[in-house]
Image (cartoon, grey):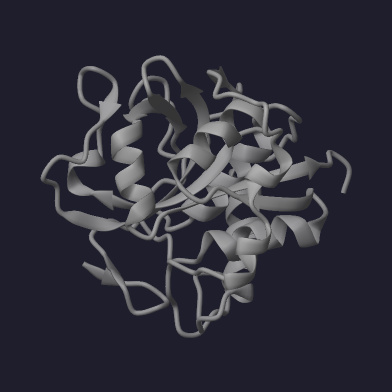
């Protein structure tokens, strides 16, 4: 086990998402931008890159970079961008001392999804972002608006998908917190498709499925889902 910036612990150096909520986020729900007449629909947003964070604690930077790479508006970024421009800068912005960037003191891994998405907004890659508050919001957001970046607890049963291609929580033990891209939703079979930052060899070409039931559990265990909007390719 090792300690993150906020004093929480993780059993794996890749799991360094720190919980940070802002009450003001409640004023920016994604559902406000979705028509009351809209119904849940299945959709997958293509993401043609498989960035690998290695054993770094940069999951926030890599998940947000995957979101930029994904449709509906493709922005070409790489692992260096994910680490240095998003993760390190988010560590400088978040409310905890230290970081993993050069010269940081004390040295700590981890940051929050909120700090990371604010970095993208300040850099000009997105103009705004909205939040999905619960399972139904996430279904509608991914089906109608675009990919979502998740910050969720991660269990020791989730390090590899099962043979069926699904992650299952089961009776797993909490291992830490992870940030990961949610790029697809299937309404008929009730699952999401996640795009991980552990390389293309992980799961099914870097991706996996997770049931709505398991996702609902993760979201209710201090999970979060942010949807970046109005992206720009020119910064």
Q: Residue at x 15, y 53 (%)?
A: 173
Q: From what the image shows, is residue 93 above or below residue 160? A: below
Residue 186 spot, x, y in % from top left: 45, 19
Residue that extends furthest to the top in the rendered view of this protein: 188
In this rendering, does residue 126 appear at all? yes
Closest to the observer, 125 or 145: 145
Closest to the observer, 62 or 218: 218
Residue 115 spot, x, y in % from top left: 60, 66
- Tell me: 51 left or right of 156: right
Residue that extends furthest to the left in the rendered view of this protein: 171
In the figure, residue 71 lies in which quadrant? top right
Closest to the observer, 132 or 170: 132
Residue 50 spot, x, y in % from top left: 52, 30
- Tell me: 174 left or right of 224: left
Q: From what the image shows, is residue 82 above or below residue 89? A: above
Q: Which residue is drawn at 64% across and 74% down?
A: 93
Q: Which residue is drawn at 19% across and 47% down?
A: 156
Q: From what the image shows, is residue 54 above or below residue 146? A: below
């Amino acid at each position: 086990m090792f300690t993150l910036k906020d004093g929480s612990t993780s059993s794996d150096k890749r799991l360094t998402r720190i919980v940070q909520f802002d009450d003001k986020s409640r004023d920016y729900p994604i559902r406000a931008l979705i028509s009351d007449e809209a119904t849940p629909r299945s959709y997958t947003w293509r993401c043609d890159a498989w960035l690998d964070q290695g054993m770094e604690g940069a999951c926030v930077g890599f998940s947000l970079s995957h979101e930029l790479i994904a449709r509906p508006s493709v922005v070409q970024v790489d692992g260096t961008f994910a680490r240095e421009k998003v993760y390190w800068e988010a560590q400088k912005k978040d409310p905890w001392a230290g970081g993993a960037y050069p010269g940081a003191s004390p040295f700590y891994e981890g940051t929050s999804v909120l700090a990371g998405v604010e970095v993208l907004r300040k850099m000009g890659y997105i103009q705004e972002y909205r939040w999905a508050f619960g399972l139904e919001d996430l279904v509608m957001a991914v089906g109608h608006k675009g990919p979502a970046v998740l910050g969720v607890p991660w269990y020791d049963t989730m390090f590899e998908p099962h043979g069926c291609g699904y992650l299952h929580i089961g009776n797993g033990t909490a291992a830490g917190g992870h940030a990961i891209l949610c790029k697809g939703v299937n309404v008929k079979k009730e699952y999401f498709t996640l795009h991980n930052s552990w390389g293309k060899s992980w799961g099914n070409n870097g991706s996996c499925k997770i049931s709505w039931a398991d996702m609902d559990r993760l979201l209710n265990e201090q999970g979060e889902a942010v949807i970046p909007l109005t992206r720009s390719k020119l910064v």
